[in-house]
Image: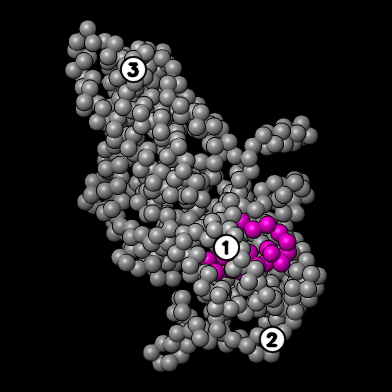
Amino acid sequence: MILNDALKEETRMQKKPYAITTPIYYVNAAPHLGTAYTTIAADSVARYQRMNGCEVAFVTGMDEHGQKVADTAQEHGMTPQEWCDSMEPAFRDAWALLDITYTDFVRTTEPRQAKTVQSFWQLLHDKGWLYKGTYEGWYCVHEETYYAESELEKDEDGNFICPDCKRPVQVMASGEENWFFKLSEFQQPLLDFYETHPDFIRPITRKNEIVSFVKGGLKDLSISRSTFDWGIPLPFDEGHVAYVWADALLAYCTGCGYGDDIDPDAFDEFWPPQYHFVGKDIIRFHCVIWPAMLMAAGWPIAHTVFGHGFLLTKGEKMSKSKGNALKPADLISIFGVDAYRYYFMSDVQFGHDGSISMERMVQVYNNELANTWGNLVSRVTNMTKKYFDGIVPEPSEAASVNPLREISDELYAKYDSAMEIVDFTGAIKEVQALAARANRYIEETEPFKLAKDASRAQDLADIMYNLLEAIRIIAIFMAPFAPNTSNEVFSRFGLGTTYDIEDIQQASVWGQLKPGSSIEVGDPLFPRLDVDNLPEME
Ligand code: MSP
């Protein structure tokens, strides 16, 4: 045990810590394509950074407190805790199905989260950032958000409705005593912070939105509720439970090791995260309230909050409540998990809204996966079997000058700079360019003709070596997005798994495939799909 810990510590010391988070999802319904989208994006980064030699803390979890969850539980005839417990498998199973490699799954009802929340708010209380007052105003239970009257919209009958979900809003009982956080005092510090940390809010459109919101002035934030008890009690006033956002945001700290008795250094090591990945709907919480809370505590703030866009089906935001939410499992049963991950990461530019459809998904699958990547692997492994008995041929020295290597030599730099800014579409495009070029190389060099001419045996060996090496390199760079396929290619090439790679730059240097090693031919990686007979994505 002690030896293991020492070893773990030693390995970790050599690696760069890297933390990334997804939102801590509400448990009022099971994961859908939207929540899966954020989670796959974070997983692709986590996998890539591990291949870059980082020790990754990848935090996700379930946001279980608050009125919305309590109401949902009641509708199902369960206690809130029973309801939350019943939802855990839905989340864990969905993430397992999508091969999500989170390192922590925080449930906000866990005792360790209560510890984080209570010590945090105690600290802010002690530092004088809290006061007791009364809140009069509007609240949307569905959004778990307070709104000023000026922000509300009206329905046809003239009743106030939520500007986000358009549901009726509640008047918060005037006279109810709440604890307030002095958010208003952070207007200038936040504006200064945005100025001095230009990468804090991305993409830039979201930054502009947040800056103008903050310039408009900030009100103090009610961080406690006393009219219901489904939440974490504030340690300095037990009749009050923490407002759901005053609880859930701190799950990021819990997941990065705050208060971990077994590994007390983890938090200092991993905090602050490189990225909080969130949908654009919750950037105010992450870009205004959250940094102000951390400033008040004197804790470091994440490097970047990335607010991605919405997935749209037929022009509408897909959501649990609109009923147009497909389950990831439905699509995985048709396309497989790697194609699922690949489609969302390549075809929806991270940061923008993106329309998704079954037709488009089939098109991307057939063009980019079946015809380009899968077909390349089939053709080349089959030719290797046929012409070289499945053994990697020895290339001549001249072979190392070739068009595939030219692309490959620049691939890491291009891919890495795209991944750094989480431009997944851009990173994938660079890898696909090599796959497409390799297919063209086959057409140009015509190995099937050379194989008939004994005097061209070395040319054939050179070409096949170059193609096999290109495949090895493509599999490395595809791994963050389509990990199972890359591992399958690695196993057919007798190369272990992509999980072993801790220095992707070095591993992807041209020429490391060993002549003399065996190559297996297997089933097509992506069997072509028939466009007819597929269900609608709605
Ligand atoms: N519990 C809060 C988050 C607390 S974080 C400290 C919450 N949960 S949620 O379950 O509603 O998840 C919201 C997130 O789901 C969005 O920010 C986004 O990441 C994702 N998406 C939900 N619908 C989506 C789409 N249609 N498209 C893309 N992502 C969407 O808010």
Residue 73: x %, y % from top left: 57, 71
User: Looking at the image, which is closer to me, 306 or 43?
Assistant: 306
Query: Can you identify the residue that label 1 sits on?
Result: 195
Identify the residue at image location x=38%, y=48%.
425
10 Å crowding of disc 2: few (<14), some (14-19), many (20+): some
- Which label number is shown at residue 134? 2
455 left or right of 1 in image:
left
User: Looking at the image, which is closer to me, 80 or 401?
Assistant: 401
Q: Marks 2 and 3, how far apart in space?
A: 77 Å
Identify which amino acid the numbered label 3 is placed on. Ala
299 left or right of 467 in image:
right
Residue 52: x %, y % from top left: 54, 37
Q: Main secondary structure of the magenta part?
A: helix
> Tag 2's secondary structure?
strand
Residue 287: x %, y % from top left: 57, 65
Say if mark 1 contacts mark 2, CB within 8 Å.
no
Identify the residue at image location x=46%, y=76%.
164
Query: Can you identify the residue that label 3 sits on?
Result: 399
**From what the image shows, is residue 352 above or below residue 406?**
below
